[in-house]
Image (spheres, rainbow, N blue to C red):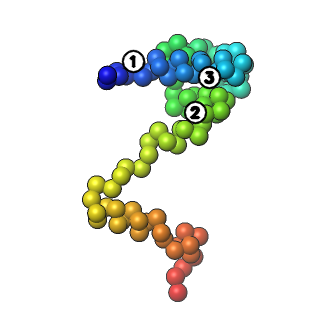
Amino acid sequence: MILTLQDHMQGLGQRIKARRLALDLTQQAASAKAGVAHRTWRRMEAEGKASIEDLVRAAIVLRCDEGVADLFPEMAASSMDALLAQQRKAIKSPRQRAGGKRP
């Protein structure tokens, strides 16, 4: 089944609510901890609508912010040349990463 944008948003709102309830937080307490307006928090749960900043704030308060970094993973290499370029980039010498100069 292909989910629509609305399906994703409503599902996200439901998961936010379930997580908040599992942590025994009221909407008001969660929104205050997150630094998000109570009205915004209600809209997040009811409609799944929020700014990226508010969504990340909610994730932090609900202790599921580790997954935020996984939302947009680096693309897999599309060719052998691209894979080699990614590997070269990943194994730069420690001096280059630290800002040092090569001899």
Marks 3, 1: nearer the viewer: 3
Secondary structure beneath dot 1 equals helix
| Residue bearing the label numbered 1 | 6
Marks 2, 3: nearer the viewer: 3
Where in the figure is residue 7, as x and y percent of width and height?
40, 18
Q: Residue at x 53, y 38 (%)?
A: 68
| CA–CA distance in space, label 3 to label 1 | 20 Å
Q: Which mark is residue 56?
A: 2
**Quarter of the rendering containing residue 85:** bottom left
| CA–CA distance in space, label 2 to label 1 | 19 Å
- Residue 38 shows up from this direction: yes
Within 10 Å of disc 1 (Cα), the crowding (few <14, some 14-19, many 20+) is: few
Q: Residue furthest bottom?
A: 103
Secondary structure beneath dot 2 equals helix
Q: Are marks 2 and 1 in contact (CB under 8 Å)?
A: no
- Residue 49 shows up from this direction: no
Q: Amino acid at mark 2?
A: Val
Q: Quadrant of the N terminus?
A: top left
Q: Amino acid at mark 3?
A: Arg
| Residue bearing the label numbered 3 | 19
33 left or right, relative to 58: right
| CA–CA distance in space, label 2 to label 3 | 14 Å
Q: Are marks 3 and 1 in contact (CB under 8 Å)?
A: no
47 in relation to 73, above or below:
above
37 left or right, relative to 88: right
**Quarter of the rendering containing residue 42:** top right
Q: Earlier in the sequence, mark 3 or mark 1?
A: 1
Q: Earlier in the sequence, mark 2 or mark 3?
A: 3
Where in the figure is residue 25, as x and y percent of width and height?
71, 18
